[in-house]
Image (cartoon, grey):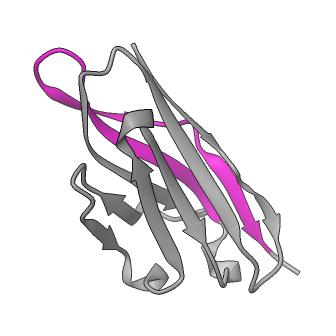
Amino acid sequence: QVQLVESGGGLVQPGGSLRLSCAASGSIRKINDMGWYRQAPGKQRELVATIASGGSTNYADSVKGRFTISRVNAKNTVCLQMNSLKPEDTAVYYCYADIITRFLPLGYWGQGTQVTVSS
């Protein structure tokens, strides 16, 4: 059984920063891509950033230059440093990981953490 546990959400003023963390645990053989998605009220879940096991990254245009994704493979963790936050960044942020437990990779999601950007 695999679990993804997120932390670090909260309320921040526009222009502020937050750091989200996600730790994967359980019977993990290998983790391929890890990433962060978000879902604002009334909107579909959208990609924020992903990072491959080798370190290559991909960002949504809306967060490029403001957000940085990183991971520590030895600890099965992924982080999202969010700077220059805007009200439109308000959403529930979900951690995602593509994990091999036995033979084939499966996608796993965290429970979500609320990020609210407001003055």
- Which range is magenta? 91-117
Q: Is residue 3 above or below residue 63?
A: above
**Is residue 70 found inside the magenta-colored segment of the image?**
no
Q: Position of residue 74 (x, y in %)?
A: 38, 36
Q: Position of residue 110 (x, y in %)?
A: 51, 37
Residue at horizontal 45 percent and vertical 84 percent from the top: 62
Q: Position of residue 54 (x, y in %)?
A: 21, 54
Residue at horizontal 59 percent and vertical 44 percent from the top: 112
Residue at horizontal 27 percent and vertical 59 percent from the top: 55
Give whichever of 115, 102 is nearer the camera.
Answer: 102
Per the picture, the main secondary structure of the magenta-coloured stretch is strand
Q: Is residue 84 left or right of residue 55?
A: right
Residue reaching furthest front?
A: 74
Give whichever of 35, 42 is nearer the camera.
Answer: 35
Q: Is residue 45 visible?
A: no
Residue at horizontal 51 percent and vertical 65 percent from the top: 43
Q: Is residue 83 visible?
A: yes
Q: Is residue 62 above or below residue 109?
A: below
Q: Quadrant of the C terminus?
A: bottom right
Q: Position of residue 84 (x, y in %)?
A: 66, 85
